[in-house]
Image: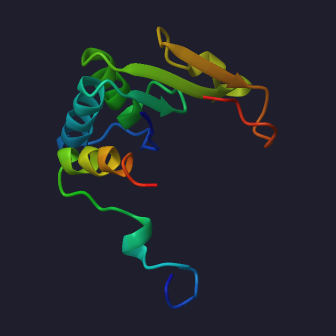
Amino acid sequence: MNICVFLSAADLDDRYTGPARDFARLLGKGGHTLVWGGSDVGLMKVVADGVEEAGGRLLGVSVEFLAAKARAGVDEMVVAKDLAMGVPPRL
Amino acid sequence: MDDEGFLPRPLTDLVFFAEEPVGALACLEESLGVE
């Protein structure tokens, strides 16, 4: 199953990173795919790290003006030309 | 939101608030069996 997350880019307290990491590991162990904006900061990095460690797939959906900041070494990174709604990529 | 007529259905139908991470994933996996 593809599971999409929207999370804070800030470096947060254990109160947030703990459950995020636990969720990520369950996601990975369950053989699911993490779908997110592809960024490598804050809670998104915590979750991406956790999914990767637990053997899950990483599928980032980014945009050209942010592509340089996207996480490296993911299974798939879709980079949209811009934010305009067109034909959505088939995931 | 409810007062402003923003919710077409009750909030609890639209959003699942998980107490623990395992609950969130369980909800997602269960939803696979629902049409």
Q: Residue A59, how many percent across, how many down?
A: 51, 23
Asked if residue A39 is positioned above or below residue A74 in the image, the reply reads below
Q: Residue A87, how many percent across, how many down?
A: 79, 37
Of B23 and A71, which appears nearest the observer? B23
Of A62 and A69, which appears nearest the observer? A62
**Is A80 left, or right, of B6 in this rendering?**
right
Of A65 and A75, which appears nearest the observer? A75
Q: Toward which corner of the image does residue A22 lie, by quadrant?
A: top left
**Is A36 left, or right, of A49 in this rendering?**
right
Q: Residue at x 29, y 15 (%)?
A: A55
Query: How is the structure coloured here?
Result: rainbow
Q: Toward which corner of the image does residue A50 lie, by quadrant?
A: top left
**Is A84 left, or right, of A18 in this rendering?**
right
Q: Residue at x 40, y 40 (%)?
A: A10
Q: Residue B12, how many percent across, how many down?
A: 36, 73
Q: Residue at x 51, y 91 (%)?
A: B3
Q: Residue at x 19, y 57 (%)?
A: B19
